[in-house]
Image: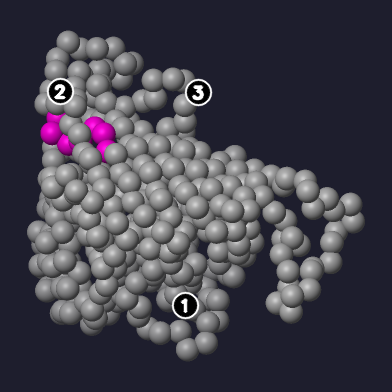
Amino acid sequence: MDYNKRSSVSTVPNAAPIRVGFVGLNAAKGWAIKTHYPAILQLSSQFQITALYSPKIETSIATIQRLKLSNATAFPTLESFASSSTIDMIVIAIQVASHYDVVMPLLEFSKNNPNLKYLFVEWALACSLDQAESIYKAAAERGVQTIISLQGRKSPYILRAKELISQGYIGDINSIEIAGNGGWYGYERPVKSPKYIYEIGNGVDLVTTTFGHTIDILQYMTSSYFSRINAMVFNNIPEQELIDERGNRLGQRVPKTVPDHLLFQGTLLNGNVPVSCSFKGGKPTKKFTKNLVIDIHGTKGDLKLEGDAGFAEISNLVLYYSGTRANDFPLANGQQAPLDPGYDAGKEIMEVYHLRNYNAIVGNIHRLYQSISDFHFNTKKIPELPSQFVMQGFDFEGFPTLMDALILHRLIESVYKSNMMGSTLNVSNISHYSL
């Protein structure tokens, strides 16, 4: 099981670190301080924060002082930030609703920075498919290597499941079922929860976030996109009741326009495999029901992934596998592999894979940065490693790019289109791309 191991080196001697400029790092709040910052701290020989931009420069200055970022500069404008030659990689960690308005001019301004090599954007890439297409084209024209934060691909559980599937341990996949809960979108809303995540069109909702991350993971594990899909999207809870930090109801109801339920069915391109998904808002009504369950059934075995949170990309999962042993498979010349002492070919084999102390919220982002470092410094000594690549696709190595994000955005757009039209759609061409 090689794909779950750390990089071949934990530090990169005799090499300058990748200089990182953040849009959205705030020491007081936000996603970046909870995930990106601690991930970079663990890779301090490979990455160094050198620049911050915020619409209020006081926020950047306060963050530099509080985090003691001695090598960082706070920039007063987006143009001065993007133009700075002290930045090798720009990380966008702000609300999705602002991505387009920030990234498009940033890419134009960055033409004055000859050192910029990487653009790292949080998922979702944009609020709409049109915006995502425009950002992708602008980044391609700018010539930077892109990264999208579909960090679930770096989960050790997802990589182990992908490994078992790709090596034939469950045989051919014949069906898949997924059930998940998106906790934000039920009957109750914490009073301090940000309003924008409950308003449709802001790029954060049950379909784009909960379903989007999970279905990307599924495609990645199975190494297959979809051929046909059918979807039904519901907003059956148009109002939510506010609750305080202790879960007490405050007697006030507020509107919600994002979906609270998704029924999705489709078939994978590889093997015409049927996939059935159900995502709902809120907590499970039965305490013994997991917030996330992915069942993958094969001709020789089965895989199950379970999580306590409905968001697969930030959950510390449990992977269950039952099926054949490695030496159940014939060798290339048709001969059978030597059997272990005491081997019983009729006995069912089970594997339970769980890392009790793994922090998936930080850990998956950390592994994403690790992959960027591996690529930049070629720590795995890959011969003739290209200076850039368009997409990760289904490769074990590398990291997801804006092309991977664009393909996912196309699928999400098709989900809404299928719901609106009330029909099954052919989506077999959404993975096509042009350089």
Q: Which residue is mark 1?
A: 377
SS state under label 1:
helix
SS state under label 2:
strand
Q: In the drawing, does residue 199 fall left or right of residue 11? A: left
Q: Residue at x 74, y 60 (%)?
A: 328
Around disc 2, counting alpha carbons within 10 Å, would you say few (fewer than 14), some (14 to 19), or many (20 or more)?
Answer: some
**Marks 2 and 1 in Cβ contact (< 8 Å):** no
Q: Which amino acid type is marked by label 3?
A: Phe
- Can residue 123 be seen from the camera position used here? no
Around disc 1, counting alpha carbons within 10 Å, would you say few (fewer than 14), some (14 to 19), or many (20 or more)?
Answer: some
Residues shaded magenta: 256-262
Q: Which mark is residue 400?
A: none
Q: Which residue is mark 2?
A: 239
Number of marks in the image?
3
1 vs 3, front mark: 3
**Sequence-wise first label, 1 or 3:** 3
Q: What secondary structure is the stretch in magenta mostly built from? A: loop
Q: Which residue is mark 3?
A: 288
**Marks 1 and 3 in Cβ contact (< 8 Å):** no
Res. 89 image quadrant: bottom left
Q: Which amino acid type is marked by label 2?
A: Glu
Q: In the drawing, does residue 13 fall left or right of residue 194? A: right
Q: Which amino acid type is marked by label 1?
A: Phe
Q: Position of residue 213 (x, y in %)?
A: 35, 50
